[in-house]
Amino acid sequence: MASGDGEGEGSVSGDIDDLESLISTTDVERLKRAWRQEKAAPEIFQFEAALIQRIKEQIQLMEETVEDFAESGIDPLTVSLYQMDLDRTQFLLRSYLRIRLQKIEKYMFHILNTDELFNRLSREEKSFAERCSNDLKMHLDENILSKLPDNYQSLLKQSIISEETDMVPKPQLDTFVVCKTKYYLGHIQLEDINNGNTDDRVNQRPLEEPFEMEPNVLYFVRYKPIKKLVEGGKIDLY
Amino acid sequence: MAGQSDPHLSLFSAEEVEFMAEDEMVEIVPNMRMDPLNLLCGDYGPFFPQMVTQVPVWLAIALKKRGKCTIRPPEWMSVESLTRILESERESQDSFQVLPFHYVEISRLLIDHARDDIPDIYMVRSLVEDIRDVRFHKIETSLESFEDARSSAVRIKNLSAMEVNIVRPFVGRALQAFYKHGSPDLVPNPDKVPNRWQPAADPVQKRPLRKR
Amino acid sequence: MYGRKASRLVKELTNVEKGQLTLFNSDLFDQVIAECSQHYVELQSLIRKMQEKGLDVQTSKNEDHYGALIHHLALVRNKRCLMAYLYNRAETLRNLIWKVGLVLPQEVQEKLSHSEEEYFKRHSASLKSYMSRLDLDLVVDMVPPKDPYIQVRVVDNIGEGIVLSDDKTANFAPYSMHFLKRTDAEPFISRGLMEELTG
């Protein structure tokens, strides 16, 4: 019932080519980790389709087991222990899905306009994102955009002379996050070499600033430079 | 002190921090035989009278409430251990003692629900509170010294879950503000940087691992 | 003074605590929209003046150009304020669902424009559709679960032979202590007949 299974599909919990594969991890552990990552990161992660599917199945099986126990006269106090375990897992599942929905609601236009992000959504989340943004578009259109002069009716741009979509809320990738790694990580590039900043300040920074992370020590770091490592499962967020 | 201005998405509530703490393992001494519990989160038992077993805190407390066991408080939760830790916390201005990541929640949960299993419980509670206070004070003073640290990353040795959660918005903001406004003096002055907020590694010299 | 009305509109968002709404100010809202049209009319007439003077609209920087620029900037600022006003209120509504569920309390309903009510209905439906596809209610279970059983002490005389949800019978003698399902105890607790024991 508590069996763990490798994923192998490039998702956060699918990194099994190391020691972790020797230590059996329960799916609940994996769900907890996915939940924590999702909570702590500014951007939305790849949807853990296989993990969520397995969790749902395990929950269903357990619900049936609890019913059987209750009917077969097993001490209700013991049955309640199984119920508590079930409640905890269900909370994690709901919370995981909820956080993702909240992120979609918050950054809907940005996600829909960024393939990389849109492709991280589940099928149902994609539908939700589209419906959600249509609802909002319609609302903004009816009340404002359709009443504005020509050339000013764009949803995403202030006017047709805007060079980029300057009205879309985007997640702050420069947010600082708390993180930890299990294994030593060296040569993490912290500063953007070419972040488009023409500040003098940037020229003063050394080009190469390899930063290293010791295992099992907490760090506060800007999310952007470690984004790929987090997505690849090498860094955990707290 | 818990920052409210952070996007609510990324902050853990106190209940959520406690929820995570409840998965930490603790020792119990069953007082009766019990069948194994094959839960979604793991398999535990079978349980035999007087045979010490490890289970998650939430399960330990539930079993205790149901009269099936007593709980063995972890080693660090003894008066001797906590007294030592408190002294060390007081002595070192710059570093934090090693404590379990969830020491605040675990001690609170056990004090609330396993009262009779904890020797000198009032002393224990008072020591934990003192330790919390000393550590908070250290965090507060260190937040003020951020102008000395390099902006890109800060390492936090031995901070616990709840302390991280409370400090998170402040450190984030301080670093962010610093990152945006920058400073011409980017090479940290080793004399001014307190040990605990060790800046990102200087690529030129290998920094030795900090002594505890 | 250009932009003043738009400022007032946006400022209304801050007049209440985060997560709350003021009454939709349709008067002010419409006035800002109307201002946009006025700015556009002015802008166009200035451009026309430049064309009549034979100037290249793209490159000439005379007083007409700057006049038009000011109208353009004022228009765009009004647009941003209008969008911010509506967008933020919509965001507050969406976030409210995660606190109070899919039905809005009366005191919030009263503050919405008709259009906002419609928007809320549509968004609710989108959310419901997602949840039903997954067969999961996501608007419940918002805080981590606790032990369904609690320790209680009987405060007042409740009596004997009370049947509980697990079909057991209990005798609730005064000052006796019991380990009950919270749901069984709650009706007694709320009537002051029992109290929950913590620790």
Image (tube, coloured by chain):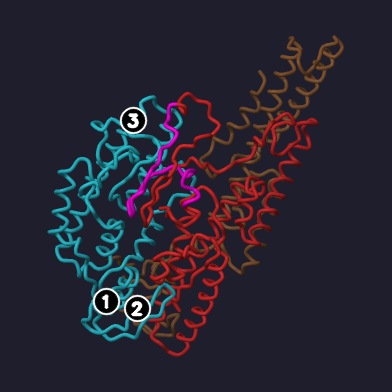
Chain colours: A red, B cyan, C brown
Q: Is residue A78 magenta?
A: no
Residue C32 against residue A169 in the figure, above or below: above
**Comparing labels 1 and 3, the label whose residue is closer to the camera:** 3
- Percent across and percent down for residue C21 are 58, 42
Mark 1 → mark 3, Cα distance in angstroms: 51 Å
Magenta-colored span: A204-229
Q: Secondary structure at mark 3?
A: loop
Q: Are marks 2 and 1 in contact (CB under 8 Å)?
A: yes
Label 2 lies in what chain? Answer: B
Q: Earlier in the sequence, mark 2 or mark 3?
A: 2
Q: Nearer the viewer, residue C134 or B180?
A: B180
Q: Quadrant of residue A57?
A: bottom right
Residue at the (54%, 49%) spot, across then down: A43
Residue A56 against residue B76 in the figure, above or below: below
Q: Quadrant of the N terminus of chain A?
A: bottom left
Residue at the (71%, 29%) spot, across then down: C32
Residue at the (27%, 44%) spot, across then down: B136
Q: Count residues near mark 2 (Cα–Cα under 10 Å), then give few for <14, some for 14-19, many for 20+.
A: some
Residue C35 against residue B20 in the figure, above or below: above
Whether residue B146 sits left or right of residue C16 in the image: it is left
Q: Is residue A226 magenta?
A: yes
Asked whether the residues under marks 1 and 3 belong to the same chain, the reply is yes
Mark 2 → mark 3, Cα distance in angstroms: 53 Å
Mark 2 → mark 1, Cα distance in angstroms: 9 Å
Q: Quadrant of residue A152?
A: top right
Residue B187 marker: 3
Residue C118 marker: none
Q: Which residue is mark 2?
A: B44
